[in-house]
Image: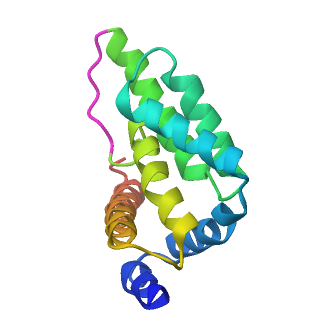
Amino acid sequence: DAFAEWWKVTNDLPQKDQDMLIKLRQMVPQLTEEDYQRCIDIANDLHFKIDTTAKPKAKELRDKLAFMMDVTEIDAGLKMHFERMVKKHYGVNDPISELEVSPAELAEFVRDVLPAARNFPKWESADIDKMRIVAARAKKRAAATATMGQKKAWGQG
């Protein structure tokens, strides 16, 4: 039963992540085949090569996701990533933040979520596995966000 599997995978996620995934589950099947395939093609391209086209491709993918979900965290994460890359170019090696989103990570998210959302409720075991990966990433990100919030609240951030 796909609904039971969905509940098992998403039940302990923060509410905003649950809501986002439900929205994607509802919206992705409504995409035209052309729009769906364009998202997957961009994600595949970003997954297999990061070059000077990564930033505009990530922005295009983000823009497509914005029609289906809140992209505030993606925006902030991509901004952090590209700012760190600029600093790195000038010799400043800042550590990677848990809240940072690289184009490759955005691509992974799309490559995992969109097919699973499109296939729901006719899930294969691969769809369930991908959603487990997405849920694990969401939990890790929520923990990092909570930690960052605590540091800021305590004047450490």
Does residue 157 show up magenta in the picture?
Answer: no
What count of labels does the image hold?
Answer: 0
Using the rendered image of the protein, determine whether residue 103 is visible from the camera's viewpoint: no
39 and 133: which is toward the camera: 39
- Residue placed at 33% from the left, 48% from the top? 98
Using the rendered image of the protein, determine whether residue 123 is visible from the camera's viewpoint: yes
Tell me: 109 left or right of 125.
right
57 and 148: which is toward the camera: 57
Q: In this view, does 64 lie above or below 117?
A: above
Tell me: 34 left or right of 21.
right
Expressed as whole percent of the image width and height from the top left, the position of residue 3 reads: 49, 88
- Residue placed at 39% from the left, 43% from the top? 105
- Residue placed at 28% from the left, 10% from the top? 91
57 and 40: which is toward the camera: 40
* The N terminus sits in image quarter: bottom left
Look at the image and give the residue range highlighted in magenta: 91-97
Q: In this view, does 90 lie above or below 35?
A: above
Q: In this view, does 141 lie above or below 85?
A: below
Expressed as whole percent of the image width and height from the top left, the position of residue 6 reads: 45, 82
Expressed as whole percent of the image width and height from the top left, the position of residue 90 reads: 35, 8
Q: Main secondary structure of the magenta part?
A: loop
Colour scheme = rainbow
